Image: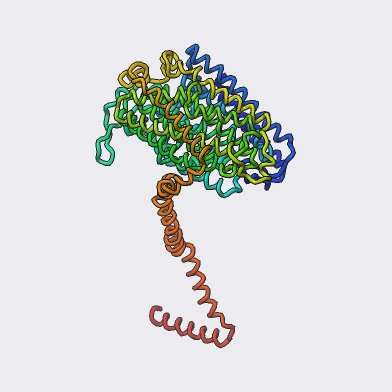
Amino acid sequence: MDVIVVFLPLLAFLIAGAIALFAGAPHDDHGHGHGDHGHGGHHKADWRDTASQFVTAGSLLVCAVLSWVIFFQVVGGGAARTVELFTWIDSGTFEVSWALRIDQLTAVMLVVVNTVSAMVHVYSIGYMSHDPNKPRFMAYLSLFTFFMLMLVTADNLVQMFFGWEGVGLASYLLINFWYEKPSANNASMKAFLVNRVGDFGFALGIFAIFVLTGSVTFDAIFARAPEIAGTTMTFLSWEVPALTVACLLLFMGAMGKSAQLGLHTWLPDAMEGPTPVSALIHAATMVTAGVFMLCRLSPVYEYAPAALEVVTVVGALTAFVAATIGMTQFDIKRVIAYSTMSQLGYMFFAVGVSAYGAAMFHLFTHAFFKALLFLGAGSVIHAMSDEQDMRHMGGIWKHIKITYAFMWIGNLALAGLPFFAGYYSKDMILEAAFAAHSPVGTFAFWLGIAAAVMTAFYSWRLLIMTFHGTPRANEHVMAHVHESPAVMLIPLGVLAAGALFAGMLFHNGFVGDGRGEFWGASILVLEANDSIEAAHHHLPGWVPVLPIFCGLIGIALAYLLYMFFPGIPGAIVRTLSGAHRFIYNKWYFDELYDWAFVRPARALGYGLWKSGDGAVIDGVGPDGVAAATRDMAARAARLQSGYVYHYAFAMVIGVVLLIVWLSMFG
C-alpha cells in the first residue's frame, strides 16, 4: 500500500505523458489559451483527453483514499514503519538506501498532498476543458505529485533533495504551461532561479550535516545531534557553532521553497500558471515543503537555539510584510498568493518557538481552505470570461451562489473566526509564540496579531470587490456570468468540508492533550522549549481572545471601506500616496534585486561576451587565425597577375638568388 500511494502518480504521469507525446496533438497546437483558463477555441473532447484525465484523476483519488487509511493506521495504531526498497548509492563508506519513511509526520503530509492533488486533478477536468493540451497538463500535475510524495516519504537527506529538486522542475513546467506567453516564461524562470539560491544553501546544509554526523540518514543524524550540539567549526577565520551553521543553511533551502522574506519574489509571479496549478503548488504542497523539512529535522533544530531564533524572526517578518502587500493588490490570484506567503510566515515562526505540532496543524488546515480559495477564484475567473482584476468584477454573487458560499467558508477559515479550521491552528501558533516568553517569541506574537487584522481585512476586501456592489464588468461579460460545472464544484465541496471541520476534529491530536500519542517519536521538543505545553497552562485570558477580536476588526473595516463608504479607500491612497506606492510595489524587492543582482550580472555577461569572448578569445583564436590566413591568401593572390613578363622576371630573380646562395654556402 505504501509503495502504491507513492508510485501510482508516477505511473499516471508516464501513461498521460505517453498519450501527450506519442498520440500526436489532437487539436491545432497553436490554440494555447492566453487567458487564465486556456480558451484556445472550443475543442470537442478527444479520446486522448478523456483517457489522460481518467488515468491521472483516478490514480490520485485512489492515492487520496489510501493516504487516509495510512493516516489512521499510523496515527491511531502507531504503525510507523520504514519500507526499504533498494540500495541507491553505495560508494566506499557512503551508503544510501531508497526507503519510504512512513511515520506520523509523513502520514499528515500524505493526506494533505494526495487529497488536495486529487481535488485539483478532478477540478482541472472542467477548468481546462477548452485547452488543447490537456494530456500534457494532467501529466505534469501527476509528476509534481510524485516528486512531492518522494520528498515527504524520504528517509534521508539525499532522497529528500531528489524530491525537492523534482518539485522545482515540475513547478517550472506547470508555471510555464502556456509557454507562448512571455509573462509565463519570465515567471517560471524567476521561480527556478530564486529557488536555486535556496537550494544551494540546502545542498551546503546537507554537506555540513554529513561532515558533522557521518551520515545523511535521519535516524543516524538524530542520534548524533545531542553530541555535536556544542562543537564549533572554522568559517572565514571565525569559530562558529557547527550545528547552528548547518541548520541555517538548511533553513535557506526552506526559505526559497516556502517563499520566506528575501526569497519570496517568485511566488506572486507564479500566478501566471493555470489556477489549478496555483492551488496545488501555492496552497497545499510545494510551498509547505520547507515547513515539513524543518519539522522533520526538529531533533536537530532543538539543539541549535540560535537558528530557531532566526527562523522565528524571518517567519514573523514574512507574515507581516506579505499581509501589507495583500491589502493593496487587485489581481484576485495575487491577493491569495500573498495570503499564502503570510500564512507560511505563521508556520515558520511556530517552528521557531518549537511549536512544531502547531506548525503542522496550520499546514494541515491551511491546505484545505487555501486550496478552496484558489479553486474558488478559478471558478470566478471561469464565470467572468478570464477576468482576474477585481476592479472589473462586482455584483456577481447572485449568478454564482455556490462559488460565493464556498469563498465565504474559505475566508472565514483564513480569518481565523471561531469553529472554522484556521481558528484552531492560527490561534495555537499565536498562543505558543506568546507562551515562549522569549524576545523573538513576543516579537512574532505582535507581528502575527497585526497580520491577523490585515488578513481579515484583505479577505473581505476580496469578497466585497468580487461579489458585491454594482457590476464593473462590461455588458458582454456580465451576460455570460455562469456557475461552474459540477466537476469543478464537487472538489470545492470536499475542500470546504476540510475548511469547516479539519480544525475541530484534529485539534486534540495535533496540539491538544493527545499530541504526545499522536506525534510519537516523529517530532522532538526539549522540555524547556515546549511552548505548546506552556500555552495550555500559563496564558493570560486575553491572549486567546485577541486574534478573534482582530479578525472581527479587519472584517468590519473592509465592510466600512468597500461596502458602505467606497470613496474612502481612494482618499486614503491619495493622502498616503508614498506609503501606498511603496507597499503596492511590493516593498520594491524586485527593483532592489534588479539593481543589485540582475543588472550587474547582465552588464558582466555583456562585457564578457563582447570584450572577453568576442575581442580576446574569438579575436585571437578562430577569428584571428582566419583573418591572418585570409590576408596571406590575398597577398599571394596578388602575385598571380596573368602577365608572362612578370613570371619571367620572377624566375630570373629566383635564378639569381639560387646562384648567390650556392656561391656563398655551396
Count of picture labels:
0
Left or right of 556, for residue 445: left
Quarter containing the C terminus? bottom left
**Looking at the image, residue 502 lies above or below residue 383:** above
**Looking at the image, residue 648 lies above or below residue 106:** below
Residue 445 point in image, percent of width and height = 36, 29
Residue at the top extreme?
77
Between 96 and 282, the one lying in front of the other is: 282
Q: Is residue 217 visible to the viewer in this orientation of the structure?
A: no
Residue 513 point in image, percent of width and height = 41, 13
Q: How is the image coloured?
A: rainbow
**Image quadrant in which you'd find residue 314:** top left
Between 485 and 287, the one lying in front of the other is: 485
Q: Is residue 569 visible to the viewer in this orientation of the structure?
A: yes
Between 101 and 524, the one lying in front of the other is: 524
**Looking at the image, residue 480 lies above or below residue 637:** above
Residue at the bottom extreme?
645
Residue 339 point in image, percent of width and height = 48, 35
Residue 108 point in image, percent of width and height = 50, 22
Residue at the front extreme?
564
Picture residue at 27% right of the left edge, 36% below the top: 234
Quarter containing the N terminus? top right
